[in-house]
Image (cartoon, rainbow, N blue to C red):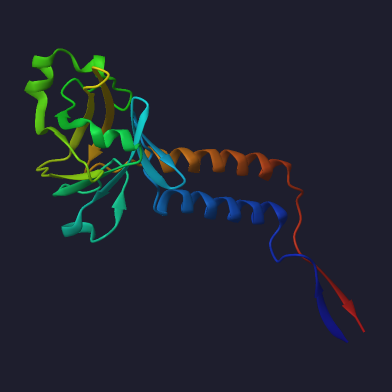
């Protein structure tokens, strides 16, 4: 007489759901997460794009000394030197003078900061930690090297000056340096666990069954 195990799983349906849900929640917390862009910077087809009025440019960030060639989008992962590269998508930007400024978020405005939130010109000047004066880039790209000595929250300001139309376009993008955002993955893990708890309650009880056949 031979004992043959029949059944779908050695675990009960409820336990299988619990194990699967726990694994997904842990993955949501532990696996690397893409940065969420803010303000004038957005993510399009896995590429960072900065919008300046009606114009657009690619936005890329690197920390070659600490992260080799790994690229970041807006938020700077490590407190160290960083290089930001701007590549124009809109050719009209090549004809304009562009300036680039980084200010400390001294008012703790956060990711929803707008240009009006920054205060007066004197307030902006007082909070400035880096400034690249207006210049035209006929080749369509430029880079900015930044040095950060401590973790914190900052706001980037990129301004394009259209002398022909006598207008200026401003892009504001809040970002952080050396901060780990645990809330994002924890939030998704919490949602997954709630879903698993609901399925667990609805799942039938029971486990593997066995039958013997001669």
Q: Position of residue 181 (x, y in %)?
A: 33, 40
Residue 176 quadrant? top left
On-image quarter of the C terminus: bottom right
Please state if 187 lies on the left or on the right of 166 as rendered.
right
Residue situated in front as seen by the camera: 51 or 88 = 88
The residue under the point 53% across, 55% down is 23
Residue situated in front as seen by the camera: 16 or 172 = 172
Q: Position of residue 165 (x, y in %)?
A: 27, 19
Q: Position of residue 191 (x, y in %)?
A: 54, 38
On-image quarter of the N terminus: bottom right
Outermost residue toward the bottom? 1
User: In the displayed structure, would residue 11 be above or below residue 160?
Assistant: below
Numbered circles on residues, count: 0
User: In the displayed structure, would residue 140 be above or below residue 68?
Assistant: above
Please state if 28 lies on the left or on the right of 155 as rendered.
right
The residue under the point 71% across, 57% down is 12
User: In the displayed structure, would residue 153 be above or below residue 2?
Assistant: above
């Amino acid at each position: 007489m031979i004992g043959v195990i029949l059944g779908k799983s050695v675990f009960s349906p409820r336990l299988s759901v619990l194990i699967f849900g726990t694994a997904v929640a842990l993955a949501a917390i532990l696996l690397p997460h893409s940065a969420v862009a803010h303000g004038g910077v957005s993510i399009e087809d896995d590429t960072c794009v900065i919008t300046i009025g009606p114009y657009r440019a690619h936005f890329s960030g690197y920390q070659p000394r600490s992260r080799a060639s790994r690229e970041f989008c807006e938020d700077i992962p490590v407190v160290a030197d960083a290089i930001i590269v701007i590549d124009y998508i809109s050719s009209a930007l090549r004809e304009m003078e562009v300036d680039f400024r980084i200010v400390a978020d001294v008012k703790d405005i956060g990711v929803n900061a707008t240009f009006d939130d920054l205060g007066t010109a004197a307030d902006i000047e007082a909070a400035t930690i880096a400034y690249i004066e207006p210049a035209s880039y006929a080749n369509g790209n430029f880079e900015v090297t930044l040095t950060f000595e401590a973790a914190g929250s900052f706001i980037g300001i990129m301004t394009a000056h259209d002398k022909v139309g006598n207008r200026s376009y401003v892009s504001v993008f809040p970002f952080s340096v050396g901060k780990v955002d645990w809330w994002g993955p924890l939030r998704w893990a919490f949602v997954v666990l709630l879903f698993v708890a609901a399925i667990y309650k609805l799942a039938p009880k029971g486990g593997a069954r066995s039958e013997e056949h001669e």
